[in-house]
Image (cartoon, rainbow, N blue to C red):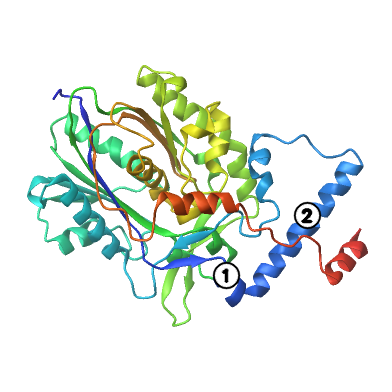
Amino acid sequence: MSHDSIGLQAFAISVPDQVVTNDAWRQQHSNLVDVAEKKLWMWQQKQAEKEARGEASAPNIYSRAKAPYMNDPFCGTKQRRCLRPGERVLDLELDAVDKALKAAELTLDDIDLIISTVFPSQEFGLGGAAFLARALDYKGAAWNLESACASGTIAWQTAKSLIATHQHERVLVVTSCLYSNATPMEDPLSWGVGDATLCAIIGRVPEGEGILSGYNLNTGSTCGAIFYDIDQRENGDPYYRLKTNDAAAKAIKDVTVDYVRKVCQGAVERAGMTLADVDCFAFTTPLAWSAPFFAEVLGVPPERTINTFPLYANIGPAGAGMNLFHAAAWSKIKPGMNVCVYSPGSVASCAAVVMRWGNVALGAMPEGIDEALLDRLLAEGPDPGIEAAPAEVAAAAAATA
């Protein structure tokens, strides 16, 4: 093994066993869904009027990718995995660590650093590394790393650098998303998010395998679009609540194309490759259309991507790794293939790594998840929403025309 042959030795995932479908909101918060559907219908009416007057702008890459979901108030979300009240993300992390160590046939004695990222980290306050180390009875180094949804990808790059400079020999990187705790059900933001944990064991691998390059940019241009505010639960407990400003979607959309092109192209070039040399792209998929959108931006065939959004919704920093895990588990990537992992993180960083896949030991797939289920959810397509506006909405639209 060479000095620079460093990459994933083992990889595992853990998700809550609670599956939450769109029916939960239709049954418990039907008024919110009704409002969302009516807004969509009225927006479509205004767009139709603009087209009739010849005022509609030509669709761009983003709007073309989003178009199939414009009738769906849930924006293509099919289901999410969410922790139940009282369940802890720490339990997901312990499960993922156990799976990864077993897959690699290692013990905690073989690990000399734990890097933890929990986003948002409200369960722990300032991060989860010490809590995880205590729960594992681990006595070695453990610290936190946070860069929003790019945290996991940046942690892999950091681990490689630490190993390459002989500061550590084998690093356990735990990446968790806890969105359900930051988005109450009465907030439509909760419709598109879930919870998940990844665990990667990074160390020296055979010559020519592993992480070949990385590239990062700050995403300062999105500052203010997404933020956290202190709120209170019904029992009076404070918590950090995820919020967006009115211009969030436009602010992120306007810069996404440049970010994905610069970062993925930069990582690929540093690896001495072109985009055509990459066999699989594992993108973070915060939206139902993210994978095909990123593929079109880069000019790569959509079949070289994987989209697990229908299984998990937006799982933040765990998104890219989740796609990578499933691609490997379902043999979409095999030893010797080149993989590009891309993670955009709003109000933080966007990051990409290029790796040559090796014989990475994989933890067990969570119960109830298989490729046939993903194929079925993808085939179902978006929720059709309302095809025609109720009489009161049509009247309101006519009154404001």
Which quadrant of the figure contains the C terminus?
Answer: bottom right
What's under tag 1, amino acid-wise?
Asp
Distance from disc 1 to disc 2, alpha carbons, whole Å, reads: 24 Å
Above or below 307: residue 340: above
What's under tag 2, amino acid-wise?
Trp
Q: Name the residue that disc number 2 marks.
A: 43
Which quadrant of the figure contains the N terminus?
Answer: top left
SS at mark 1 in the image: helix
Above or below 185: residue 206: above
Observer able to see residue 270: yes
Give the image location of residue 210, x and y in percent.
Answer: 26, 30
* Residue drawn at the location 29% of the way across and 35% of the way down: 157
Observer able to see residue 186: no
Hey, which residue is sitting farthest left in the picture? 109
The crowd level at tag 2 (other Cα within 10 Å; few <14, some 14-19, many 20+) is some
Horizontal side of residue 386 vs 127, given as left or right = right
Looking at the image, do the residues carrying marks 1 and 2 touch, with CB atoms under 8 Å apart?
A: no
User: In front here: 83 or 71?
Assistant: 71
* Residue drawn at the location 54% of the way across and 35% of the way down: 294
The crowd level at tag 1 (other Cα within 10 Å; few <14, some 14-19, many 20+) is few
User: In front here: 182 or 22?
Assistant: 22
* Residue drawn at the location 19% of the way across and 43% of the way down: 171
On residue 23, which mark appears? 1
Give the image location of residue 63, x and y in percent.
Answer: 68, 41
Horizontal side of residue 188 vs 331, given as left or right = right
Hey, which residue is sitting farthest top in the picture? 272
Give the image location of residue 269, x and y in percent.
Answer: 40, 19
Horizontal side of residue 398 vs 354, given as left or right = right
* Residue drawn at the location 39% of the way across and 18% of the way down: 273
SS at mark 2 in the image: helix
